Amino acid sequence: MMGRNGQAAWMLQTKRADFTAIANKFGISPVTARIIRNRDVIGEDEIDRYLNGTIRDLYDPHLLKDMDRAVALIQEKIRQGKKIRIVGDYDIDGVCSTYLLYRGISRCKGVVDYQIPERIKDGYGINEAIIRKAAEDGIDTIVTCDNGIAAREQIALAKESGMTVIVTDHHEVPVNEDGQEVLPPADAVVNPKQKDCPYPFSGICGGVVAYKLVQVLYEVCGVPQREWEDLLEFAAIATVGDVMKLQDENRILVRWGLKQMPRTKSVGLRKLVEACNLDITALTAYHIGFVIGPCLNASGRLQTAKLALELLLCQGEGKAEQMAAELKNLNEERKELTAEGVEEALQQVEEKLAQDPVLVVYLPECHESLAGIIAGRVREAWNKPTFVLTRGEDCVKGSGRSIEAYHMYQALCGVQDLLLKFGGHPMAAGFSLEEAHVEEFRRRLNEQAQLKPEDFIPKIWIDVAMPLEYLSERLVEELKILEPFGQGNEKPQFAQKNLHIRSVRVLGKNRNAVKLSLVTEQGLPMDGMLFTEGDRFVEELGSSRMIDVIYYPDVNEYNGNRTLQIVIREYKIRS
């Protein structure tokens, strides 16, 4: 979607390397070598790991600070038959982390159960009520996953109650005024974001931290490594679902996790894939991020995340099928509510907030679980950092989505005196505040924002300005080795100027696809597919017959014939 305040800027990557040498060394084309360099993969070892990395190339989990201590504690509690409770989170990363720890500790014969906070009742992360309930239930040890790093007071309460607490998380570590880390008083804190953690890659999600803990637990309990590898798809789903960068070890986890999906031991996961009409043998990161993931998230948004977790744990065919259908229906309901919220939010921005560098949209009646999705859609439309606030039972809750130029977590630190609770990343955050402070929150964030007009112009990066004459089926096939595509390993984008349009046809019952018959300046004919509102595009095109495009090459199969075509991602009409 183009920003409302002007066209997006088309930028050509100009990173340098000896592309011919890389191509010869790895048996790829110079175009593919250039794309890999554009993803900041540099040096022969890194390129080899990017192209050929396997589970054996994952980092040593013992490098995570406090990992050995955490596992030794869990092993001791298992040996003593003490009650262990996992406290997760209601999003996809939290559900997968809880699943992994529950499966792992159960396999090692631990007495274990789980608690996932209710989004509306409990809010994010561990709270006092959860701790008091654990004490009542005779729980000896709490293990958090995908939360806990900021729960200093709550964990202090658990310690006062005589419990052992192990925190596993990946969120930013809170700091005090002097910039020193403030850790919760847990018995072990496993989080790669700690400054003194020697783990080489801090960009893993909560699910991967949990996955690594299970790896070490299985090692010390004598469970075969194969059983740990059998859980890989859940680390992959968590990584994509929590929008981690598909770089470094995340790329390996997701790439091999997708390959393992057809062999998943989870009947529930298989039934969910079927309910979404997907082929489990051909899943991509896109399917996880935009089809499977939202279904797993929907239960934590509109009901309870325990439903998603119970589906993943379910081994009965009939029950799993019924639960998968329920999750899919919940997600359909979530989509409808989201569409209404997005419309209302965009209207509010148009009418009174369009001049603000930071958009703070208050939708009192909106379901609070949808605030983050709506913030993301508004951010896409305006390319401005966006916070969406909703009215909760006792306070206003908000969720934000950012742009590269605006560190959202730091921005919230600058107004923390107004907030009851907050946490997050540079690109996304969650918080709560009193309703009386909403206007001041908006005013101060905008006063403190040091954003320049150019920060709001979306940049679209082109990998290679590549004439259509260069395309071949072999290249289309070769580009598949770059998958999985997603955040931090985006699908390649190519550009071609001055294409002549011979004809235009709007297709589909919703008229949301356009087939263009194109010809290059050299006279090469090729079809282009554009997925957009067809009639609006035809109107915009008017009498013009020239177009510049950003595209991805594809092979169209029809009646046994294979022809090259391009899928147009962005375009500029030439007058």
Image: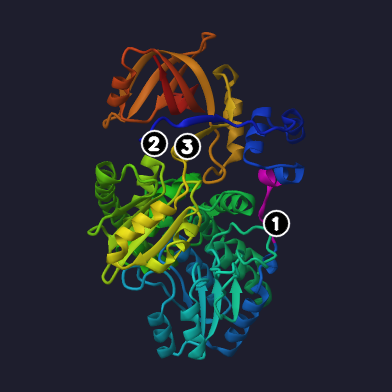
Q: Could you say where residue 304 lies in the image, as x and y percent from the top left? A: 33, 68
Q: Nearer the viewer, mark 1 or mark 2?
A: 2
Q: Which mark is residue 454?
A: 3
Q: Position of residue 66 (x, y in %)?
A: 65, 74
Residue type, mark 1 in image: Arg
Q: Residue furthest front?
A: 447
Is residue 296 located in the magenta-colored stretch of the structure?
Answer: no
Circle nearer the N terminus (2, 3)? 2
Quarter holding the C terminus is: top left
Label 2 near label 1: C-beta < 8 Å?
no
Label 2 SS: loop
Front label number (2 vs 3): 3
Q: Earlier in the sequence, mark 1 or mark 2?
A: 2
Residue 482, compared with residue 447, is above or below; it is above
- The residue that label 2 is drawn on is 3
* C-alpha separation, residue under disc 1 versus residue under disc 2: 43 Å
Could you classify mark 2 by the number of other residues whose Cα lies within 10 Å: few (under 14), some (14-19), or many (20 or more)?
Answer: some
Tag shown at residue 56 = 1
Identified by mark 2, the residue type is: Gly
**In this image, 141 relative to 6: left or right?**
right
Horizontal side of 152 relative to 543 (left or right) equals: right
Decide whether the magenta segment is chiefly helix, strand or loop: helix
Quarter holding the N terminus?
A: top left
The alpha-carbon separation of the residues under discs 2 and 3 comes to 12 Å
The foreground one among 157 and 117 is: 157
Choose the circle earlier in sequence order: 1 or 3: 1
Residue 80 occupies quadrant: bottom right
Q: Which residues are magenta?
A: 49-59
The residues bearing labels 1 and 3 have C-alpha atoms spaced at a distance of 44 Å
Residue 64 position within the rendered picture, expressed as x and y whole percent measured from the top left: 66, 68
